Image (spheres, coloured by chain):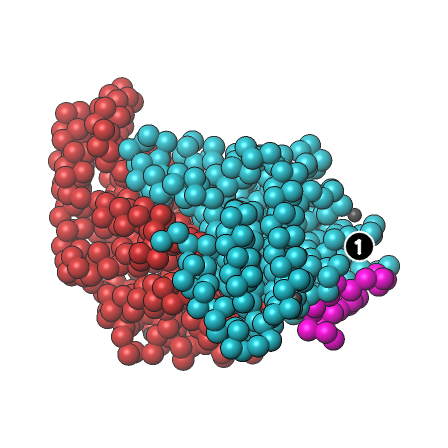
Chain colours: A cyan, B red
Amino acid sequence: MKKHNFSAGPSILPRVVLEQASKAILNFNNLDLSLIEISHRSADFVAVMEKAQQLTLNLLGLENKGYSVLFLQGGASLEFLMVPYNLMKENGKAAYIDTGVWSSKAIKEAKLLGNVETVASSKDKNYSYIPKNFSIPQDAEYVHCTSNNTIFGTQIKTFPKTDMPLVCDMSSDIFSRVLDFSQFDLIYAGAQKNMGPAGTTLVVVKDEILGKTGRTIPSMLDYQVHINSESMYNTPSVFAVYVSMLTLQWLKDLGGLAAIEKMNNAKAKLLYDEIDTNPNFKGTAAIEDRSHMNVTFLIEDTEKAASFDKLCKEAGISGIKGHRSVGGYRASIYNAMPLESVQALVDIMKKI
Amino acid sequence: MKKHNFSAGPSILPRVVLEQASKAILNFNNLDLSLIEISHRSADFVAVMEKAQQLTLNLLGLENKGYSVLFLQGGASLEFLMVPYNLMKENGKAAYIDTGVWSSKAIKEAKLLGNVETVASSKDKNYSYIPKNFSIPQDAEYVHCTSNNTIFGTQIKTFPKTDMPLVCDMSSDIFSRVLDFSQFDLIYAGAQKNMGPAGTTLVVVKDEILGKTGRTIPSMLDYQVHINSESMYNTPSVFAVYVSMLTLQWLKDLGGLAAIEKMNNAKAKLLYDEIDTNPNFKGTAAIEDRSHMNVTFLIEDTEKAASFDKLCKEAGISGIKGHRSVGGYRASIYNAMPLESVQALVDIMKKI
Ligand SMILES: Cc1ncc(COP(=O)(O)O)c(C=O)c1O
Ligand SMILES: Cc1ncc(COP(=O)(O)O)c(C=O)c1O
Ligand SMILES: [Mg+2]
Ligand SMILES: [Mg+2]
Ligand SMILES: [Mg+2]
Ligand SMILES: [Mg+2]
């Protein structure tokens, strides 16, 4: 049965990528060896790593602008710790924008290393909007934000203007839209939404912001150590990097961020229009802050919810249960999600 | 062409495991979804994680003995940091046995957190032997050793007897032989030798040794945080955990550690016997400390080396170049390596 996979992460990947990955497990590059049993220092894998790095810079428009690309382990959650370790002086200060569970987890780890000023928060309304019009203290060493709030279905459309290094957790919307990525000094993202399988984390960092804290940083937490070794300081997550490279190549072949943004906008419009016009459904996020990746909504009538669930199941729709902190539904419509799958969901909504 | 893959890591995996993994990328558990696009919190993946944990305890003979099993990200290299963070008091002391590059990297990270006493080292002879007859200071908080030295081809046969928590980096020989694993209080191992693909790290820890340092530990570095969330504090490296589970099941079906130890001994004997009887080859490790996983040897005559290289290439033998710090050759003969591949190598050695 054809499935429509709305999972929030790990999540849908392009079919052609899955097919290539499946083959590489048996025989990679016609080596008569599996991708996962060759040395990460072999020429064949080093080429994969380099290509993944080049594609990243190319897609983000950051080639020759002083950025390094890393594929690390640990997930975005380890970045919550690595960011302050690398950017915050002992007893230094950082400014964080609190737009959801992931922002607040980032804040929690940063507090272990210095002073964190939460310059804005939407916690007062269960993170249903993006705070605007806040000011950033002049003595902060960096500003941290979360571009897309996977759980709450909100997305930052305009980023803070600041002279300080701007750090962004883009785990759930990287590579989904055109932005001036040079406004960021450090971007990180767990692979398992728009980029690949779980197991690798992308970090794009402007070299000049590193090495300024005076801290002794443990090797595995030190971006400069990983940069110096081209993401091979220790054994990288070979399979996850390979599949990410394939996905980035797929995206480039499709036309890059401009092309995918158009498709993502069309999918989001289709779904939000139905939520807005259908009296049985209600969006949970402030309209101007709605995410084009994670669409959160409620059905207030519990009987209708039961029949919606049943119809979804029959249609092969999976992964749309909302996160417990919001309830209701969450349809994640990442890059690899085709319009037809969103249409399949909307068709069911129309029957409610 | 049939390849004989002697790579030191990532390294050979059982063919049946590769076939199952390749299929799961396209359709996992007949869900009509890929293994790598479903939620890590789905019942299907939670079952994989639990099975991997159970198989680990079962194979090591540690069921119901107060141990927890974790599958983390970061590689064994991140464990070099996590071990002292979790076990060493502020300004505390730990005893390390220095048997190679990996031990000394572990020592380097531990020194960032406290006092490290290197109680024994074989650095004086380029790590070609395992030091014996050393004493451990009574005020150490734990003792750290490396069971198998992947680069230098040595292996600890008898472990230090101590009342302190005994920690062991088993990255390159875990699941390869019968040991009383209950003598260890914490075992860790990057998956990419005997267990699976790169991207996950096994940690087996005796619960009672945790929580005694008084330190505030960053969430991602805190074993207790990961234990409380059953290795799902954040998104685990789904594919690497799945393939590890398959490999552990393969090992169990084969007869477990007693069965694989017999096979590993036979492979090692075949190769070391040839090294010892053939005048063209010379082993680099002290005979009583020789590794049954990584067999390091030299050819002193450079012309003979060239013809050996040529014959190896023609026979499909790959991955036997020695590490630069030893030179010569290293044949890694991990669990999944069949006797026939070792025989193929020995056949060539006989021609030299
Ligand atoms: C925005 C965001 N940040 C961070 C994370 C945590 O990522 P990981 O599980 O890779 O640590 C997630 C996971 O869903 C996320 O959506
Ligand atoms: C004994 C030993 N310890 C640690 C490591 C480092 O492992 P990782 O690359 O997973 O960090 C290795 C890698 O080969 C190893 O052989
Ligand atoms: Mg700026
Ligand atoms: Mg409505
Ligand atoms: Mg003991
Ligand atoms: Mg000899």
Chain to which the residue tagged by mark 1 belongs: A
State the image quarter where residue B303 is shown: top left
Quadrant location of the C terminus of chain A in the rendered image: bottom right
Q: Position of residue A36 (x, y in %)?
A: 36, 44
Q: Nearer the viewer, residue A297 or B2?
A: A297
Looking at the image, residue B148 sits to the left or right of residue A96; the answer is left
Q: Residue at x 19, y 34 (%)?
A: B345
Q: Residue B11: x and y, percent?
A: 32, 44
Give the magenta part as a residue range. A115-137
Q: Is residue A122 covered in magenta?
A: yes
Q: Nearer the viewer, residue A230 or B229?
A: B229
What is the tally of numbered marks visible in this picture? 1
Question: Where's residue B70, x and y in %?
Answer: 40, 66
Ligand 5, image quadrant it occupies = bottom left
Measured from the top left, where is residue B86 in percent x and y?
Answer: 50, 70
Residue at x 54% of width, y 78% of height = A302
Residue nearest the viewer, comparing B330 with B41: B41
Q: Which residue is mark 1?
A: A160
Q: Considering the numbered disc 1 on the image, is that residue within a helix, a strand or a loop? A: loop
- Asked whether residue B160 appears in the rendered view, the answer is no
Q: Residue at x 16, y 33 (%)?
A: B344
- Using the rendered image of the protein, determine whether residue A277 is visible from the camera's viewpoint: yes
Using residue B22 as the reference point, say whether residue A49 is left or right of it.
Answer: right
Q: Is residue A19 above or below residue A199?
A: above
